[in-house]
Amino acid sequence: MREHQNLDVLVIGAGFNGVYQLHKLRKAGFLVKVFEAGSGLGGVWYWNRYPGARVDTEFSDYQFSLKELWEDWNWTERFPGRQELINYFSYIDRKLDLNRDISFNTRVTSASFDSTTNRWSVFTNVGITVNPRFLVLCTGFASKPLFPNILGLDTFQGTVHHTSSWPQVGHDMTGKRVGVLGTGASGVQVIQEAAPIAGHLTVFQRTPNLALPMNQRRISVATQTRMKEDMYPILFKRRQQTFTGFHYDYLPLGRFYDMSPEERYIFLDDVWKKGGFHYWLGSFGDLFFDQKVNDEVYAFWRKKVLERVRNPAMQRKLAPEKPPHPFGVKRVSLEQCYYEVFNQPNVALIDINENPIVEITQKGVKTQDGVVHDLDVLVLATGFDAVTGSISQIDITGMDGISIGDKWKKGPSTYLGMTVSGYPNMFFPYGLHGPTALCNGPTCAVRPSIDTLFRESNNNSSQEIQGDWIVDCLTYLRRHNYTRIDAKREASEAWVQRVADIFSKGLFDGTKSWYTGAN
């Protein structure tokens, strides 16, 4: 790497955004390298090895739109599992020859900007130092695990695994007493896998997961061959035109009130049967803004869930009459048999709002009622220090010598959701103040700004896509012999206020989630 110390661009992270940046920047003639902390491609999918790990986006949307990639690739399932996604990255590597410009097992520990040379000094855990002109952080929104602050966690004598650091060789839970702490997306998936094989499964729930049926199915090669003849190019263009980067979209605002109650019920039943996010992101656009609409959507969801859960006590915990928060203001999870799990005699559900965890002992988890839930395996499905944590875990200092983590303690600030004032020549796709929370990795690599999501932009904004925007920006700077670019503080403040104003129009406020920075 010594011969590449003065890079044009250093990309951090080899997930969807990182490999896209590498490919596009190389094609544009830049000297670019990627540093990746893991030993392989995949980003979050390299690390997410827990049982049941699976993407929540349909195969047709969760892939790159480059023809040289999709024309020879076929998926096997509507919602690909972790191993198939790793296989996809290996395929991309072979097609685009990515490996030659990637340093694996190389974690960036710090970076500082030198205003005399207009270059970054980047340091790693393996002693490599490089000085790129530009720094592109493709660290994603979920790369720093969040561990619960519970008394005695380090005293537990059984096995503890966080879902983000599951052993590569796996862990057999057959016949064991398993506890799962957390019922977010990873918690739901682990629970579905553990319940059929565990001797006993105890689930510790803070907030009911308002999950939707995945409606998983196999996808034939013949089906995809037909789609490639005409539908693929259309679907890829369509996903850049919609609210969230999927090929389907909400009904226009106000459409809810144009329908009779019977028409609305039939419509909700139709999108429910489609599975996936159709019930959430292909339903009424008003559900984010109008409590009456949201209540009706929740009531339909609750009716469907109650039909699958037999025990009244379980029904109350999993689908309470009063919703724990407005439907859809947290990222919705997809499930395949989650609610049926709680009909099994070997499964217990602890509501830690009613019966909080007091401590973790050598034998298991002790709750406020004095009961120690004996465990052999404790799974921490407690998520991530989302969005900001992926960046702030690196000691990045800007013009004023302040680390970005300390700067954001006063409140996150960005410009366009891709740059930070005072940190010149630094960019990041799929981060805060962008479309991250309502999007997916491949689409966000080529995705409009948050303005477009809320129909608040002019017609040109939808063309300023994140991944290509960064490449186009660097190409412009090179063409005009500029060596430095930095967002003005006033522009950043205006952008943050813009995002806040848009956000305040919805039902998101007051709900604890990674959307609102609760974790």
Image (spheres, rainbow, N blue to C red):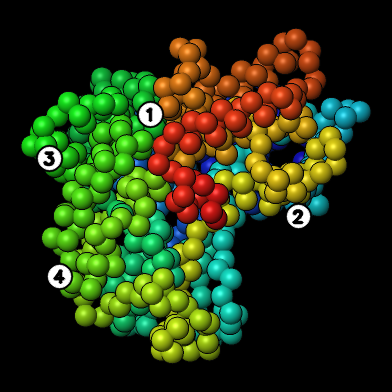
Give the left or right position of residue 355, taking residue 404 as reference: left
Label 1 sits on residue:
243
**Where is the N terminus found, in terms of image quarters?**
top right
Task: Kindly state the secondary structure of the residue where label 4 is placed.
Answer: loop
Q: Earlier in the sequence, mark 1 or mark 3?
A: 1
Q: Earlier in the sequence, mark 4 or mark 3?
A: 3
Contact? badges 4 and 3 (CB < 8 Å)? no
Label 3 sits on residue:
265
Label 2 sits on residue:
125
C-alpha separation, residue under disc 3 versus residue under disc 2: 56 Å
**Residue 246, picture quadrant:** top left
| Residue found 35% across the figure and 57% down from its top | 324
Q: Which mark is residue 310?
A: 4
Q: Earlier in the sequence, mark 4 or mark 1?
A: 1
C-alpha separation, residue under disc 2 versus residue under disc 1: 40 Å
Specify the amino acid type for callout 3: Tyr
Of the two numbered discs 2 and 1 in the rendering, the one whose residue sits closer to the viewer: 1
Give the left or right position of residue 139, taking residue 271 as reference: right
C-alpha separation, residue under disc 2 versus residue under disc 4: 53 Å
The residue lying toward the viewer, choosing from 208 and 438, is: 208
